[in-house]
Amino acid sequence: MVLPGQASTARRGGGHCGRSARFTSRWRQVLLPLTLLLCACAGSPPDPRPVAALPALQLDSGAVRVEDVALEVTTPDLLATDAAMRAFVERHTAGIVRPRQQLFALHQAIRGFASLGIDYDPAAEGTATEVFHRGRANCLSYASMFIALARQAGLQARYQWLRVRPQWTVRGERVLVRLHVNALVNVGRHGQFMVDIDPLPTRDIAGSRTLSDADAQALYHSNIAMEALAVGAARDAWLHSVRALQLSPQMPHLWVNLGAIYRQAGQHGEAEANYLHALQLDPGNDSAMNNLVVLYGLQGRETERALWERRVDDYRKNNPYFHAWLGEQAAGQNDWEQALVYYEKALQLLPQDSRLLFALGNVHYALGQRDLATGYVRRAIEQATLRSDIDAYRLRLRAMQSGQSARAGAAPAPG
């Protein structure tokens, strides 16, 4: 486990973060996005759907048009700093030459209660300046504040998007798709560090990519839109969703969100068009597929509903995380033979994943196959990217070699 404020040496990439704001050292590129495995396609990118031509949202109170966005929605500078923030950076980094030490000093100053101290609040949207002064942030607003301060110190800092591992119900139904944003800081030859206020366990990360500042602004508006939709404020939801798309029209999930707003307003044709465009951008976007299944069911279009239901099922069958989840369920019932089948399928779909290799090692050990077990754990160590994972795998390997009870190695869910 990496302690708050401590760096964790990484090999060939990877990422981990814990409950309080902390960072994790990474070398070069990290986890390949799941979408690359599921929906990579040849050829040129799809033609963009013109945001300016989006049909108006029809409400009882009147139509809401794209032209209204410029009149009613303002995009703040998420990364603006004020005099107090600049003084804070100067106070804690002045005289420090090396980027790595600058980052450590800045991070410690921010996370320490004696210095700044930021509390996690999932509803705390806002700019870097707002977060700095109020002391509360969600993942996006914390990233904005840290990036703003890091850039003020002369560090190379960017937004990073982490895709969270999918989750299913006991019946195998998809129940949650979650996205997470943190800060990524490049410190030259010492690699890169992730900085996060509400970090994810590495086992829950399914992919990552860097984001532009405009992408982050789009996510800011998207968050506001979804909060508005949840309380029935369709007008605000639509305005902020359209603004998000004006900033980042290539983000598939933004089109899915807009489709949900149209669907709630009864504009099923527009909802369908948005879901289909999301699938043009990302043919493996299962959120868009699931929304089409729901939409066609509402419309009584059984042929189309059945078609997309089959596609959702095909996606699930080709998703390594689904098979890993099945393996986790089987291991939880001590059905090691069945767990082995599921984990092997997951590894076939996601070769060389260290957490899958580790899980297979634990399953083989539970089956009394010690040589196979230690072989898989050694491979997991070779493929692992985080020092915390490597240390955990080595500890488990020593336990296996000493003949410790298999019960201590119940296969964890790989990430």
Image (cartoon, rainbow, N blue to C red):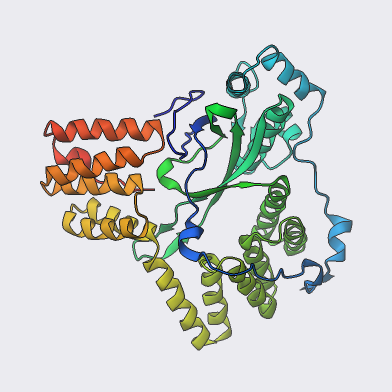
The number of numbered badges drawn on the structure is 0
Residue 405, image quadrant: top left
Which residue corresponds to the image point at 44% horizontal and 28% vertical from the top-left? 9
Q: On the rendered image, what quadrant is the N terminus found in?
A: top left
Asked whether, in this view, residue 78 is left or right of residue 161, the answer is: right
Q: Position of residue 283 (x, y in %)?
A: 54, 69
Q: Position of residue 188 (x, y in %)?
A: 59, 29
Which residue corresponds to the image point at 51% horizontal and 42% vertical from the top-left? 29
Q: Position of residue 247 (x, y in %)?
A: 75, 55
Q: Is residue 311 above or below residue 331?
A: below
Q: Position of residue 387 (x, y in %)?
A: 39, 31
Asked whether, in this view, residue 315 is left or right of residue 78, the answer is: left
In the rendered image, is residue 184 in sight?
yes
Which residue corresponds to the image point at 48% horizontal and 35% vertical from the top-left? 17
Q: Is residue 73 above or below residue 113?
A: below
Q: Nearer the viewer, residue 372 or 7?
A: 372
Q: Nearer the viewer, residue 408 or 38?
A: 38
Asked whether, in this view, residue 362 is left or right of residue 4, the answer is: left
Q: Is residue 290 above or below residue 367?
A: below
Asked whether, in this view, residue 294 is left or right of residue 2, the answer is: right
In the rendered image, is residue 176 in sight?
no
Single out the residue that lies furthest toward the right.
71
Which residue corresponds to the image point at 71% horizontal and 20% vertical from the top-left? 89
